[in-house]
Amino acid sequence: MLHVLYLVHDVSDPAVRRRITMLRTGGARVTLAGFRRAAAPIGDIEGLRPIDLGATRDGRFVQRLAAVAKTAVSIGSKLRDVPKPDIIIARNLEMLGLARRARSAFGAAVPIVYECLDIHRLVLRDDVLGKALRATERHLARDVRLLVTSSPAFIANYFKPFRQVAAPMELVENKYFEAAAILPAERETVEGPLAPPWRIGWFGALRCRRSLELLAGFTRHMEGRFEIVLRGRPALSEFPDFHAFVDAEPYMSFRGPYRNPEDMAAIYHDVHFSWAIDFFEEGQNSEWLLPNRLYEGCRFGAVPISMDNTETGRFLRQRDIGVLLPQATPEALATALGGMEQHRFDRLKARVLAHDPRMWSYDRSDCGALVEKLRRLTTVREPLATEALA
């Protein structure tokens, strides 16, 4: 059984749980080690007890670097009870340096996989700091065996033009995970809530103040014909007044966190549209990413809303689905959605449901394919051909 040491920047990140599930479903044994954003150590993730590397703070890049530097000195003792892994996966740049230190501690040539699912705004700066961070990434990634990323735009706009990683690149999209095999003819037929009001669901990492203000302005303008349902983890480092802001809005509600994948069908069946827009790092990461909510919402028949000039917008336009906005204003939203009627919504939803569920989901066979690709890294020295996991 392939033994994977998974080093992560935040063990409580729901995406970490999803990747652990994929690896274990594919037949791998996983040891998890990482930092946490919570005050107390995390006791259990999918039956795993993570090796705690200490606390870091969201949005505090310097503090995180200091924590990584401190841990680099003691990583050997932190992993002293861990058998030598077959492969190390480093999630994000800050963990890549620790992966190299861990490999040295094991005293063996363990292959390293670099998993990068976001391009941090600091590495895109054109000043001394940005150039230094890119040089550091190139140095740390000089002998990684595989780069795993989630959007082709990350490759086209960052990794290739800046020549950051020479290794083969594997596209593993942020798809929903299905525990059972996906049947090609399967379709979602569950009816959504009665409308009006029309409900827009914004789920996941809630970190975009501009989206929050835009949606609030739109619903006030529509005087109750539209409601906003928020679920997930608000980034209080970006808007510490999040809860007060939402409480003051008459057509907006925050309904707390949810479990992925257990709660996904229920929360998306409770809305008509999914908000697939993020201005958090406008013009850079937010324009290039293909977010989890894109796949999750479409899997359960929620009609996605996106900006037209983003990678998500291009993705939707190619498939002739969704609602695309030319501008991020309440007026543009009102033009696109304000006159919504049931017959139009039924057509929009039917276009989403007409696509094979495999476009939105990974199942056990995909997990097995991913683990098999990782296994090949431990036995084959020549570079692997770049291909997307489909």
Image (tube, rainbow, N blue to C red):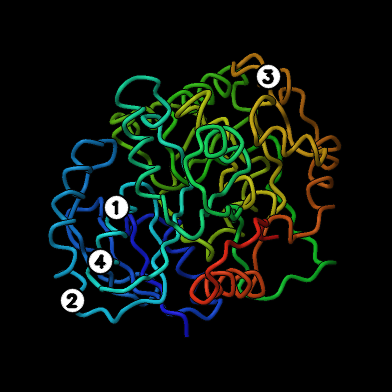
| Labelled disc at residue 30 | none
| Labelled disc at residue 334 | 3
Q: CA distance from mark 4 to mark 3?
A: 57 Å
The secondary structure type at the circle numbered 3 is helix
Work out which residue is located at the far front of the displayed protein and give it.
382
Q: Sequence-wise, which precedes: disc 3 or disc 1?
A: 1
Looking at the picture, how far across and down is residue 306, in whole percent? 65, 32
Position of residue 346 in the picture relative to residue 139 (left or right): right
Q: Sequence-wise, which precedes: disc 4 or disc 3?
A: 4
| Labelled disc at residue 97 | 1
State if disc 1 and disc 4 touch (CB < 8 Å).
no
Q: Label 1: how many residues lie within 10 Å, few (<14), some (14-19) or many (20+)?
A: some
Q: Which residue is mark 2?
A: 80
The secondary structure type at the circle numbered 2 is loop
Q: Label 2: how many residues lie within 10 Å, few (<14), some (14-19) or many (20+)?
A: few
- Residue at 77 percent across and 29 percent down: it is 340
Near-viewer residue (236 or 382):
382
- Which tag is nearer the camera, tag 2 or tag 3? 2
- Which tag is nearer the camera, tag 3 or tag 1? 1
Looking at the picture, how far across and down is residue 345, in whole percent? 79, 38
Position of residue 28 in the picture relative to residue 366 (left or right): left
Q: CA distance from mark 3 to mark 1?
A: 48 Å
Q: Which residue is mark 4?
A: 104
Q: Sequence-wise, which precedes: disc 4 or disc 1?
A: 1
At label 4, the amino acid type is Ser
Q: Quadrant of residue 5?
A: bottom left
